[in-house]
Amino acid sequence: MALSKKTKQSPTLRLTPLTQFGYVDPLGKIQRGEKVTTLRKTRKRGIYELADGGSRFKPHRTGVFIEFYQSDKVDPRDLTDEQWQADGIDAPRSQNGLALLTHFYGTGPSEMFLNHFRLVKGQ
């Protein structure tokens, strides 16, 4: 994904730790290679800079960049514990993961995209 012509910066992807759902230290897990996917309602493509908090308009940029290289359409109810773990969810994984989706979307969507990424810069 090209840099924005207006800002000359990469788009950001905001990470929000939610300990009540077993979603703890997502930035650290990405840097250690423990979190390698993100479950979203849309496909992600290209390179994004991770933001740790802030708003959509003034994100707290971290200097950590990831590149999305694959998106798979999945039903979140069918994900294995290993897939939830790759998404950064701690045990009990499927229970916490589905509760997290319900928190964000009201009801757990039946179709989502499991977006795979790799760390590009920012160890």
Image (spheres, rainbow, N blue to C red):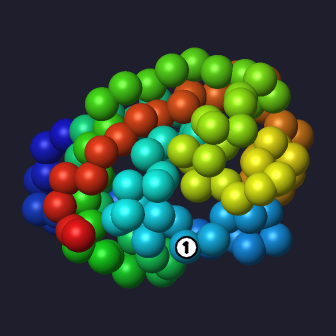
Position above or below: 87 against 20: above
Q: Which residue is mark 1?
A: 25
Can you name the residue that lies furthest to the top here?
A: 73
Residue at image x 47%, y 64%? 29
Residue at image x 51%, y 20%? 72
User: Viewed as shown, does residue 105 lie left or right of 85?
Assistant: right
User: Viewed as shown, does residue 47 lie left or right of 28?
Assistant: left
- Residue 94 percent coordinates (x, y): 80, 42
Frontmost residue, 8 versus 121: 121
Residue at image x 11%, y 62%? 8
Disc 1 is placed on an element classified as loop
Quadrant position of residue 33: bottom left
- Please identify the quadrant where the N terminus is shown: top left
Quadrant position of residue 80: top right
User: Viewed as shown, does residue 46 lie left or right of 15?
Assistant: left
Label 1 Cα neighbours within 10 Å, binned few <14 / some 14-19 / many ≥20: some
Residue 47 visible to an observer of this rendering: yes
Residue at image x 31%, y 76%? 62
- Residue 16 percent coordinates (x, y): 59, 70
- Residue 118 percent coordinates (x, y): 30, 45
